[in-house]
Image: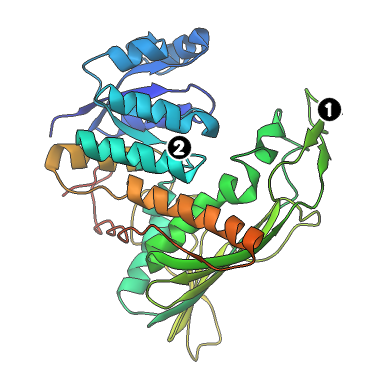
Amino acid sequence: MKSVKVGIIGCGNISSIYCQAGQKFDILDIVAVADLDYDRAKARAEEYQIPKAYTVEELLADPTIEIVINLTIPKAHAEVCIAALEAGKHVYVEKPLAVTREDGQRLLHIGEEKGLLVGGAPDTFLGGGIQTCRKIIDDGVIGEVIGATAFMLHSGHESWHPDPAFFYQTGGGPMFDMGPYYVTALINLIGPIRRVTGSARITHAERTITSKPKNGQKITVEVPTHITGVLDFENGAIGTMITSFDVAGGSKLPNIEIYGSKGTIIVPDPNTFGGPVLLRKHGSQEWEEVPLTHGYTDNSRGVGVADMAYAIRSGRSHRANGHLAFHVLDVMHGIHDASASNTHYELASTCEQPKPLPVGLKEYTLDE
């Protein structure tokens, strides 16, 4: 199958793993990188032997590039994606799809109008750990799924991140920072969500940075930092989700648990690709670790882009698609909105539950 030519916009830390994906998946041919800081783009191109270091405008104007991977900051996601679509490129964007629902809808509309694919992170749900959980559910091992819990609890970023202010500004907060991993994993395992409600609060109106180089600087907190949501899935299952930057003492709660009529699964961290996967069947006194049934257990960011590249060549649908990413965005906003309005929020969006990966795929391929 002919490879797909790819350009990356945004050469920050996360760009390294996407550049590595281009060296592993034959379907991907990363031919150019771009950044507002041209020297940073040039350094990344040299590091990974990528042919071109461009300005953003030059990359969008290159007629050979078919997919643009957008790794800019969240506030720029929609603007860069729309510019790429208008230039005739398919786009794959880091999470979240956009900051607002309106921007997310706009870029999906432009993609559909132009016959271009939109994809979005996270793609960790394609990793061996969560795909193994999906197979357990699909095989009926835990029976009918009746519920789930998801927890992402820590004390925030100001003690270790070199520039943590954006985590507490519009587009940030624990829900929009880490929520995409959890909500995407839940939709992959259970299906789309029809209704949410929740409660949210800002615990500290101001945060003090204690990390270098901005030690002592103050951050005004603009977004909720402790959020509890209830998710009603279309299939009748009920989920509870807590995301927080306010848990100073840490937590021993699991990342995700899925409850079925015949057993329970402990799902691995949805920000990772591997295991372990733990299963306890009804009547058993012990948890058993389930051998992983799928590959992509190391850090495999970029597998979602590769899956989209196969879709471009074959005409099939891709799994980490824009409709999934928009549904996740709608869910996250819905929980905040429900808290602010003291109501349930009926989701205006939906999506198809992503198809599972086949068992036994050859390494760094996605189609048999």
Type of amino acid under label 1? Asn
In the drawing, what numbered circle is on residue 94?
2
Q: Quadrant of the N terminus?
A: top left
List the single residue furthest toward the front.
Answer: 341
- Residue 268: percent from the left, percent from the top? 51, 60
Type of amino acid under label 2? Glu
Name the image quarter holding residue 286.
Answer: bottom right
In the drawing, what numbered circle is on residue 215?
1
The residue shown at (74%, 36%) is: 160
Say what secondary structure mark 2 lies in: loop
Say what secondary structure mark 1 lies in: loop
The residue shown at (63%, 61%) is: 341
The residue shown at (29%, 25%) is: 86
Q: Is residue 128 left or right of residue 39?
A: left
List the single residue furthest toward the right.
Answer: 216
Which residue is at the front of the view, 245 or 252?
A: 245
Q: Using the rendered image of the protein, determine whether residue 240 is visible from the camera's viewpoint.
A: yes
Q: Is residue 158 left or right of residue 193?
A: right
Q: CA distance from mark 2 to mark 1?
A: 28 Å
Q: Is residue 97 left or right of residue 222?
A: left
Task: State whether residue 207 is above or below residue 47.
Answer: below
- Residue 334: percent from the left, percent from the top? 53, 58
- Residue 167: percent from the left, percent from the top? 66, 39
In terms of sequence position, does the residue under pointer 2 or pointer 1 come before the other?
A: 2
Which residue is at the front of the view, 250 or 286?
A: 250
Q: Using the rendered image of the protein, determine whether residue 228 is visible from the camera's viewpoint.
A: no
